[in-house]
Image (cartoon, grey):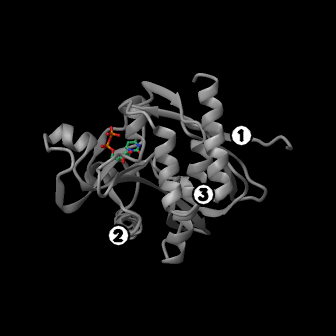
């Protein structure tokens, strides 16, 4: 493949210059990190699966009118996206207590929340992505009030849509993280959904067994990480029978090598 200019390398993805101005290529790696990158590893085949899952979700969201950066999937690990100016805020939507919320407030993991919570974190690895309030966002000018209203509205729409989509395949959407970016139309900026939506940034539990089907398997060393990501893709109907067997072959190959 022709040499391309790398724009940015993150923990799980690489961004390359796109074929046209205003576009980028988003490459999904198998690398995984947790606890602000203190824990590192690889999840074999994760990039391929997340590329497919994120494509599916962003395409479905576009179909209900949520604007996103996704243009089209290019190959197994890459998708063409619109270049955006990333808003430096991680938006976390919670339906059920888990993770940092359970820890911080002492609420038992798995407790259904009486209403959906939206939280904001400042995207800054050196600071460990601290939680922030609307006041900080306004004070430091990270986003305007109008942009924050649009972000909250979109977050709720995405949550409603994804909760239903996952419930239909026997998965409970516990919480997830979204990122947004600005696109410019002359002097006018508009906010669209960016980044990815995949088991890397969602908590997904089997409705019947409460089994974790997401990155918590990696964070907590529960094993079966690859299988959990595959299971989500399989339930979403994204694995063709031949791909499923290819994935299984990979597994048996790894087992043969004693890994
Ligand atoms: N999350 C994420 N990236 C982050 C922090 C959180 O994708 O940098 C996701 C995480 O996967 C979970 C949700 O946001 O689905 C809420 O995470 P939480 O605040 O509980 O933090 P964690 O337990 O990951 O420290």
**Residue 160: mark in rendering:** 2
Q: Looking at the rendering, in which quadrant would you find the C terminus?
A: top right
**Residue 6: mark in rendering:** 1
- The residue at which mark 3 appears reads as 239
Left or right: residue 246 versus residue 85 is right
Q: In the image, residue 45 lies at what x, y percent?
A: 60, 41
At horizontal 39% and vertical 30% (from top left) the residue drawn is: 221
Crowd band around label 2 with a 10 angstrom C-alpha radius: few (<14), some (14–19), many (20+): few
> Between residues 124 and 158, which one lies in front from this camera angle?
158
Crowd band around label 1 with a 10 angstrom C-alpha radius: few (<14), some (14–19), many (20+): few
Does residue 127 lie above or below 7 as drawn?
A: above
| Residue 197 seen from this side | no
**Mark toward the start of the polypeptide (3 vs 1):** 1
Res. 129 image quadrant: top left
At horizontal 37% and vertical 33% (from top left) the residue drawn is: 222
Left or right: residue 16 versus residue 244 is right
Q: In the image, residue 208 lies at what x, y percent?
A: 29, 57
Crowd band around label 3 with a 10 angstrom C-alpha radius: few (<14), some (14–19), many (20+): some
At horizontal 29% and vertical 48% (from top left) the residue drawn is: 136
Q: In which quarter of the image is ligand 1?
A: top left
| Residue 131 seen from this side | yes
């Amino acid at each position: 493949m022709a040499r391309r200019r790398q724009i940015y390398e993150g923990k799980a993805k690489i961004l390359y210059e796109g074929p046209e101005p205003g576009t980028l290529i988003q490459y999904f790696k198998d690398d995984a990190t947790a606890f602000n990158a203190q824990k590192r590893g690889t999840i074999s085949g994760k990039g391929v699966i997340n590329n497919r899952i994120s494509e599916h979700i962003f395409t479905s969201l576009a179909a209900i009118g949520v604007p996103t950066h996704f243009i089209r999937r290019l190959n197994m690990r890459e998708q063409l996206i619109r270049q955006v100016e990333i808003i430096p805020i991680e938006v976390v939507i919670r339906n059920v207590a888990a993770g940092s919320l359970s820890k911080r407030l002492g609420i038992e993991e798995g407790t259904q929340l009486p209403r959906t919570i939206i939280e904001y974190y400042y995207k800054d690895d050196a600071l460990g992505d601290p939680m922030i309030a609307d006041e900080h966002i306004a004070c430091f000018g990270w986003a305007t009030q109008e942009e924050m209203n649009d972000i909250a509205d979109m977050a709720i729409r995405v949550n409603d849509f994804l909760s239903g989509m996952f419930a239909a395949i026997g998965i409970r959407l516990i919480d997830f993280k979204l990122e947004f970016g600005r696109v410019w139309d002359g002097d006018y900026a508009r906010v669209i959904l960016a980044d990815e939506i995949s088991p890397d940034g969602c908590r997904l539990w089997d409705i019947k067994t409460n089994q974790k089907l997401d990155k918590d398997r990696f964070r907590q060393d529960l094993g079966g990480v690859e299988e959990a990501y595959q299971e989500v893709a399989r339930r979403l109907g994204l694995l063709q029978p031949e791909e499923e067997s290819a994935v299984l072959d990979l597994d048996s190959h790894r087992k043969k090598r004693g890994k």
